[in-house]
């Protein structure tokens, strides 16, 4: 047998929460109509960074792939040549793929990267309707070209000397040639 | 790492020395180095320059230990390099484990080495498998006190097309220079300059062209020497390593195949103290891309009777077509020399059981009855004979019909080691080659064909060894003389073939006079024994035809069909005649890895697996079995045994074996023949005088040449020795050829041009490489060692006949040859 309190008071008390909430500001986010910024250090989609002249920072060392606990990264290195230079040193990442079906966005790859080539953005919209498009290629991951940057391959525009290049000794950057020129030199 | 000590099998007791290392008493043989004595108690002293197969040098100073008592009651005042310090009775050694002094010395030295070593591990090919990286972590300080700029050099430098040198990374341990000088005998890489600028380098215009240069890459303890082919291809942690056996010669060198995503990335030397120690030839190391060329066959092809083109077909369909075509014909089987023991056994059984014939031969080269009889009597099924270790203990080794550096690289290195230990090498050859020079060989100059007479004049003792190369088989009376020499002197005789599958094919019975296990066809008892084992009523008892006989019988119509596996027509005694014979044959089944020059004549082309995609066993020239496992599992890539079993089943005569494992098991159960051996009748030596106006040709294949198993290894091929004609000054003068100028060698079949060099050949003899720079001597001239050819100067005003291959035309010729193949189909 239920008591009198259970029969009469408890149903009304239950609505107390509802009534109280009616006078509070709602917490519902109107995603995707309204997008709210993430926390500044949120682990989102990766980005492959560039040197100030547009050359890639990635040297294809595969340490990110080694560090990855989900085996989501695949890298193949290759040799830069005088005619076709993608990064300032001897080696660059010819193939760079991150499989976002596997990636758990833990950020161990970022910690492993010796050249700060790989960092994470705050972009979190990593959904698609097929598997293939979720394997991001190098072209998808490379940072956009900022003013003064030229799409590789091209020669080192900051300095010919490797050691000065990394120290940025001859900054500010010499304005890059028009892309058509570097195309011809190839 | 392991070492073979000379005379390790001797029962003479070794004098032991007792010393104390890290408070542990240990007894080791006299002369042992402290660094290795410490390994015995489980202490690894860090080291860079020390290598158990190289002489101690004490160059890197990393292995410093404290020696409180040198065995004479007095301590050493400073830490000592344990890699150059021999043990002494009563010696007390303290390594980094128990001594703070030793530990500090080692840490200090590592910091010192790293003062100039760039921290570019992420872009270095050695990163992840680097002794410097590992030991810096295990024995080094985390931080360096050096803040100055590091020493800079331009990088990388090509010391050869294969090997790249990064001088910034070098710690001057001299492993590479010591290897080149002590082991390979090619001291083309050395220390240059002094002080801070000291560096490894080569002389101007003298690249590091050694057949063994790849070993320096492997033993470099830092990333200073790297492989041009493997540069930036992958990292050690990507690779799956599988031990295997090299397929390029009959030496059976142990290798390690590293693959990534079903693609072989590189090959390294394996460690087998009984065979190749830790060294392999560049051919074993760099030539592995041949099996993945575009002309690789992936699906069976059957010739369409209407269009005459080869068309892809399913496996069951193609096997049925092959069986229908072979049924009721008189077939000959040519197996080539590259089969594994198990596959060769399948061919041998297929020929006898399914085709009912003894017309089977593994030799794709000129053959003689004398050689057939010699192999049947002396070699087949005899198990292990002379071994590599025996060479170390031999007093004298006689080389005849064999140029070890070109034809058996591992054997060459073992011989060179034996020579350093006091073995004498006598070579019967036309001239002192670079390889023979490095062996300190005493040259007995013989013109090709004269080996038999020279052998008859040698006298040896019971501790000596005669190594007869396969070229001796083409000399009338040559093998008889070698056998006679061994018999009358008590010396041991070994037959050294060129190809990996030759000895295995012989043991498996791919010879017209032999069944598996060395059972002679002529012995009724052996036939009955084998028929019982195979569960069949009767085996063919007629002596079969050899390679030449099969080709002739196909041409004349006595044989109407052929099963050809892995044969290069250009290797056969007369390539043009072989082409005509296959053209005339009614039905040709070709089992091939890649489309070959047999494919255009084949009615059915069945793709088979290369060694990397199957398991099997190679048998070395010693008779040692070298089993290996599948490296790459590729679906639809079948070994020869499976394909032949399929045809046999369609023919209604099943082999009873379908897998490599089953073939191996059956062959083992069969065992070797212990009954009477077929007799061997010695043949007299016969030197045919060269017709007037001609010279005698001497030729063999160089290690790095145009062989199909080296296709695709382009940087490696650039290190080949130049194709030069060699003759003495008198011979060149008699023919009117200036040294350094082009000379033309011709027969009635064709002509080829070479640059002439002067060498110490006998009068009237010329030497050219058999298959280099686009000239296949047998294809062009239809001539081999001992054959007469005409030597002429090249007169540039005369129009070059079409059939001549001149140096300028070679490039296009080679490209053309690669495009050929006559196969439509899978690509």
Image (cartoon, rainbow, N blue to C red):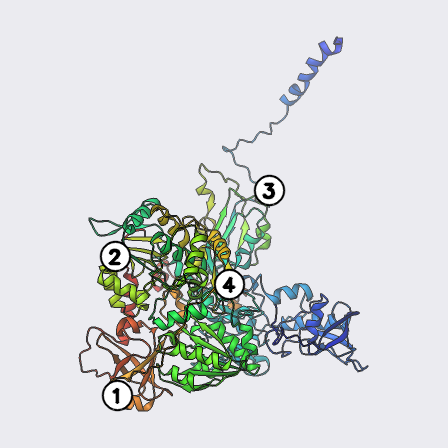
Q: Secondary structure at mark 3?
A: loop
**Which badge, 1 or 4, comes first in the chain's sequence?**
4
Quote the CA–CA distance across marks 4 and 3.
Answer: 66 Å
List the residue tagged with mark 4. Answer: B625
**Of A98 and B316, which appears nearest the observer?**
B316
State the image coordinates of residue B21 (x, y, percent, origin top left). 76, 71
Q: Residues within 10 Å of mark 4 (few under 14, many from 20)?
A: some
Q: Are marks 4 and 3 in contact (CB under 8 Å)?
A: no
- Please state, as top left, top right, bottom left or bottom right, where the N terminus of chain B lies in the image: bottom right
The disc, 1 or 2, on the residue closer to the chain's N-terminal end is 2
Q: Which residue is mark 2?
A: B560
Q: Residue A39's mark?
A: 3
Q: Nearer the viewer, residue B457 or A142?
A: B457
Circle 2 SS class? loop
Q: Which mark is residue A129?
A: none
Closer to the observer: label 2 or label 3?
Answer: 2
């Amino acid at each position: 047998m239920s008591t009198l309190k259970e029969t009469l008071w408890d149903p009304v008390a239950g609505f107390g929460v509802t009534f109280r909430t009616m006078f509070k500001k709602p917490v519902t986010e109107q995603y995707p109509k309204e997008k709210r910024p993430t926390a500044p250090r949120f682990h989102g989609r990766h980005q492959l960074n560039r040197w100030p002249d547009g050359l890639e920072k990635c040297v294809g060392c595969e340490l990110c792939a080694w560090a990855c606990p989900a085996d989501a990264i695949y890298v193949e290195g290759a040799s830069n040549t005088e005619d076709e230079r993608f990064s300032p040193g001897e080696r660059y990442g010819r193939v760079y793929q991150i499989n976002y079906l596997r990636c758990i966005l833990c950020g161990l790859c970022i910690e492993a990267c010796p050249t700060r080539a790989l960092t994470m953005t705050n972009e979190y919209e990593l959904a698609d309707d097929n598997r293939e498009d979720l394997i991001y290629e190098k072209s998808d991951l490379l940072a956009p070209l900022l003013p003064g940057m030229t799409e590789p391959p091209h020669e080192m525009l900051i300095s010919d000397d490797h050691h000065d290049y990394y120290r940025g000794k001859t900054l500010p950057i010499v304005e890059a040639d028009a892309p058509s020129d570097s195309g011809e030199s190839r | 790492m392991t070492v073979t000590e000379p005379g390790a099998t001797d029962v003479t007791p070794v004098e032991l020395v007792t010393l104390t290392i890290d408070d542990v008493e240990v007894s080791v043989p006299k002369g042992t180095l402290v660094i290795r004595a410490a390994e015995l108690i489980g202490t690894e002293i860090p080291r860079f320059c020390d290598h158990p197969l190289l002489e101690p040098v004490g160059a890197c100073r990393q292995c410093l230990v404290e020696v409180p008592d040198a065995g004479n009651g007095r301590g050493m005042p400073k830490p000592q390099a344990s890699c150059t310090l021999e043990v002494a009775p009563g010696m007390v050694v303290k390594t980094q484990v128990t001594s703070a002094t030793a530990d500090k010395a080692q840490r200090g030295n590592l910091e010192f080495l790293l003062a100039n070593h760039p921290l570019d591990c992420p872009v270095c090919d050695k990163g992840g498998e680097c002794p410097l990286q590992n030991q810096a972590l295990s024995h080094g300080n985390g931080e360096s006190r050096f803040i100055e700029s590091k020493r800079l050099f331009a990088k990388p430098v090509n010391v050869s097309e294969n090997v790249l040198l990064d001088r910034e990374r070098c710690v001057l341990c001299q492993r590479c220079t010591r290897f080149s000088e002590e082991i390979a005998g090619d001291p083309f890489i050395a220390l240059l300059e002094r002080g801070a600028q000291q560096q490894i380098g080569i002389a101007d215009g003298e690249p590091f062209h050694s057949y063994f240069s790849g070993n320096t890459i492997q033993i470099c303890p830092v990333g200073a020497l790297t492989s041009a082919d493997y540069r930036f291809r992958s990292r050690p942690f990507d690779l799956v390593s599988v031990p295997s056996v090299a397929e390029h010669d009959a030496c059976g060198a142990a290798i390690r195949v590293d693959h990534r995503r079903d693609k072989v990335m590189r090959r390294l030397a394996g460690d087998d103290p009984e065979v190749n120690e830790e060294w392999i030839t560049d051919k074993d190391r760099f030539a592995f891309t041949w099996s993945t060329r575009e002309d690789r066959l992936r699906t069976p092809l059957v010739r369409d009777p209407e269009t005459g083109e080869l068309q892809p077909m399913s496996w069951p369909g193609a096997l049925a077509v092959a069986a229908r075509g072979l049924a009721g014909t008189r077939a000959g089987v040519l197996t080539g020399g590259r089969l594994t023991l198990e596959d060769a056994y399948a061919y041998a059984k297929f020929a006898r059981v399914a085709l009912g014939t003894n017309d089977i031969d593994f030799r794709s080269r000129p053959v003689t009855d004398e050689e057939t009889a010699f192999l049947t009597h002396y070699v087949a099924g005899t198990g292990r004979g002379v071994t590599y270790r025996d060479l170390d203990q031999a007093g004298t080794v006689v080389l005849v019909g064999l140029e070890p550096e070109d034809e058996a690289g591992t054997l060459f290195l073992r011989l060179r080691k034996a020579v350093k230990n006091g073995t004498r090498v006598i070579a019967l050859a036309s001239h002192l080659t670079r390889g023979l020079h490095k062996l300190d060989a005493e040259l007995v100059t013989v013109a090709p064909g004269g080996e038999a007479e020279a052998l008859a004049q040698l006298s040896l003792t019971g501790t000596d060894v005669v190594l007869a190369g396969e070229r001796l088989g083409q000399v009338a009376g040559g093998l008889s003389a070698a056998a006679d020499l061994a018999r009358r002197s008590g010396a041991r005789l070994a037959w050294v073939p060129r190809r990996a599958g030759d000895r295995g094919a012989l043991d498996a019975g791919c010879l017209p006079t032999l069944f598996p296990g060395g059972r002679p066809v002529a012995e009724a008892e052996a036939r009955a024994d084998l028929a019982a084992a195979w569960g069949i009523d009767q085996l063919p008892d007629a002596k079969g035809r050899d390679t030449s006989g099969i080709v002739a019988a196909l041409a004349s119509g006595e044989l109407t069909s052929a099963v050809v596996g892995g044969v290069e027509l250009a290797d056969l005694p007369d390539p043009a005649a072989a082409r005509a014979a296959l053209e005339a044959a009614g039905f040709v089944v070709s089992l091939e890895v890649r489309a070959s020059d047999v494919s255009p004549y084949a009615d059915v082309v069945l793709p088979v697996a290369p060694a990397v995609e199957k398991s099997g066993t190679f048998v070395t020239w010693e008779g040692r079995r070298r089993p290996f496992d599948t490296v790459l599992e590729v679906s639809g890539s079948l070994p020869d045994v499976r394909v032949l079993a399929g045809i046999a089943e369609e023919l209604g005569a099943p082999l009873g074996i379908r897998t490599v494992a089953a073939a191996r098991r059956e062959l083992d159960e069969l065992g070797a023949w212990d009954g009477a051996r077929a007799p061997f009748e010695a043949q007299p030596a016969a030197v045919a005088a060269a017709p007037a106006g001609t010279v005698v040709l001497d030729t063999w294949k160089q290690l790095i040449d145009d062989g199909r198993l080296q296709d695709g290894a382009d940087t490696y091929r650039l290190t080949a020795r130049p194709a030069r004609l060699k003759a003495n000054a008198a011979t060149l003068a008699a023919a009117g050829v200036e040294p350094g100028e082009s000379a033309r060698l011709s027969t009635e079949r064709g002509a080829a041009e070479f640059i002439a060099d002067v060498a110490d050949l006998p009068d009237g003899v010329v030497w050219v490489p058999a298959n280099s720079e686009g000239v296949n001597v047998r294809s062009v001239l239809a001539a081999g060692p001992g054959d007469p050819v005409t030597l002429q100067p090249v007169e540039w005003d005369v129009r070059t006949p079409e059939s001549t291959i001149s140096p300028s035309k070679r490039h296009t010729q080679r490209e053309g040859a690669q495009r050929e193949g006559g196969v439509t189909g899978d690509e």
